[in-house]
Amino acid sequence: MRDGGERIHGGGLVDIDRGLISRDIFSSQAIYADELERVFARAWLFVGHESQIPEPGDFVLGRMGEESVIVNRDRDGRLHVFLNNCRHRGMRVCRYDHGNTRKFYCPYHAWVYSDQGALIAVPKLESGYHNELDRDEWGLIEARVSSYHGFIFACWDEATPDFETYLGDHRFYFDDYCELPDGTFGDWEALGGIFKWRMPNNWKFGAENFAGDYYHNPSHASVDQVVLSPAGVKGRHTYDTVTRKREVHKLNICITPEGHTARGELFKDDYDYMPTYQEMPVVEDWFRECYAKRQERLGEKSRWFGHGGTIFPNVSYSNGVQSMGTWHPAGPHETETWRIFLVPKAAPDEVKNVLRHYVIRYQGPSGLTEQDDMENWGYAHEGARGTIARRHPFHYGMGLGHERKGWPVDWLGGDVYATEDVSEQNQRAFYARWAAMMDTPPGAETRRPADIKAAE
Amino acid sequence: MDIGADKALLDRLLLKHAVEQFYAREADLLDSRRFQQWLDLLADDLRYWMPLNYNRPFGAWDGERSAEGRDLNWFDEGKFEIEQRVKQIMTGVHWAEEPVSRTTHMVSNVEAEAADDAIVEARCRFLLYRNRTETETDFYVGKRHDRLRRSGDSFLITRREIFLDQNVLLAKNLTTFF
């Protein structure tokens, strides 16, 4: 771009082999515009959870890239994701955050659409349009929809593979997230409301941080000195109280070629449940029972305890606080983050309350932990804007060449690499996928290996 | 003129004045970062609640806010949790408030009514201005409903409902107290 020629992302702006990434990818308006076309218009994006729209006619507004979408369950129970945009002049056809309706009514010229997206009424069809408007051609713009264990993803591009293919070997980690604490695929229930807030940084700062950045612990030096964990002792994680009694591998996991990432703990042995909620007998009993059931159900694989990850490009989930967050682009210099939180539907109220109370204080703009993240991302973003600053790339080289495949156990997945403790392997995998997608012209397949050189 | 009515009016004015003085003192404590002393104004059984706001059809106001004790809320907690927030700021490494923001708490439209001998229900509008580091500036504007318990010649806050007039939160965080 600086030389006026065609911009090269992979090997150019994003040099994975050396672990160097240009600051331009965070601050350039031109790159941002291409991201909307080449990444967001082609990727599977998270738009909501089925429990937000349980009944026929239910809808909730979502967002894909910069654009508003309607996520609804039609009168026959089918899920749809529509661009929230009238085909005539682009006015939003729905401006209520959630509700139940059979019709979406445009306030501008009164075009009316059904809950299945059909254009069902147009004023002056006869006197104005002389019956020459083919209503069948002018229904709402609809995205492909995939509900994976109740988590709804949508995609605008027909050339993108189906969601499960898109997920690739990340499936093990996302399945672990989707499972209830007892290891079954039962019902999660989204708590009412969606956290929506603005932060002054490029969307990729949040995505890469949640991808697996155990190195950023200094960000949270303050919260580690106060009481946040629901167990009622110092520390911010539920597992802070228990894991130090266990031998674990703390792992960063990246999935090539899809660029999804996860982080978590692999127990080195089968451990019994460790008391976590001693002050709350109902909660303690429930989690103890779930733990035992999960061990029985999953066997050796129950040794994996995911902490969270990022499904490329902008969906970050956290286990334990059970959140689904999306880093929506809002210009190169701003992100509008949305996040929902879920609780096991069948759990006792005491359990739901503990989880709800914890998540509100952990994540989001009022959360003791994420507040410090956003401060760092905002000023790091400023550091990606300066003329002089942009001459110098960011360093993503930690642990380069030390990624290990099929380690520490062979059941973590096929195209999966792992590193222990701190590493920037996951960020490199994320940006390798990003660069591959950005270098791929519209219409072509975007899945491409990330060329990790595994350690011996 | 009816002397009884005058007495009632005078009582109301005195109560309003007392509440306004209390709010002025509270704002001063917060804006001068005397957080420990501010905590002394909070009752041990405090409920501190700030809901989310939804866009709803005209008249469907019941569902306009997220529910306390059930849904997501920006805040839904008690004094212990507020104390943790104060402690966090005072570690000196709470980067979202280090260096500490400059704040100005404005309180207006105060209405106060004695529910009984012990409890006063107070309503007001607030404008909280925050500026931090160099140019970062946020305005938080909304309504507040407080339940105050008489304590000596002052009050303790036992319940604070904070209604921030925003749907998408425009500030990157909520690290200040309302």
Image (cartoon, coloured by chain):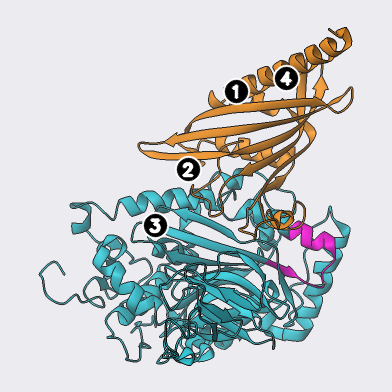
- Dot 4 falls on a residue whose secondary structure is helix
* Letter of the chain that mark 2 sits on in the rendering: B
Q: For the point 13% across and 66% down, which residue is it?
A: A2
Separation of marks 1 and 4 at Cα, in angstroms = 20 Å
Q: CA distance from mark 2 to mark 4?
A: 38 Å
Chain letter for cyan, please. A
> x, y (%) of residue B22?
68, 20
Amino acid at circle 2? Trp
Q: Is residue A189 left or right of residue A24?
A: right
Q: Nearer the viewer, mark 2 or mark 4?
A: 4
Magenta part of the protein: which range?
A: A342-355
Residue type at mark 1 is Leu
Q: Which residue is mark 1?
A: B29
Which colour denotes chain B?
orange
Q: Viewer-proximal residue, A304 or A90?
A: A90
Q: Is residue A303 visible?
A: no
What amino acid is at disc 4?
A: Lys
In magenta stretch: residue A353? yes
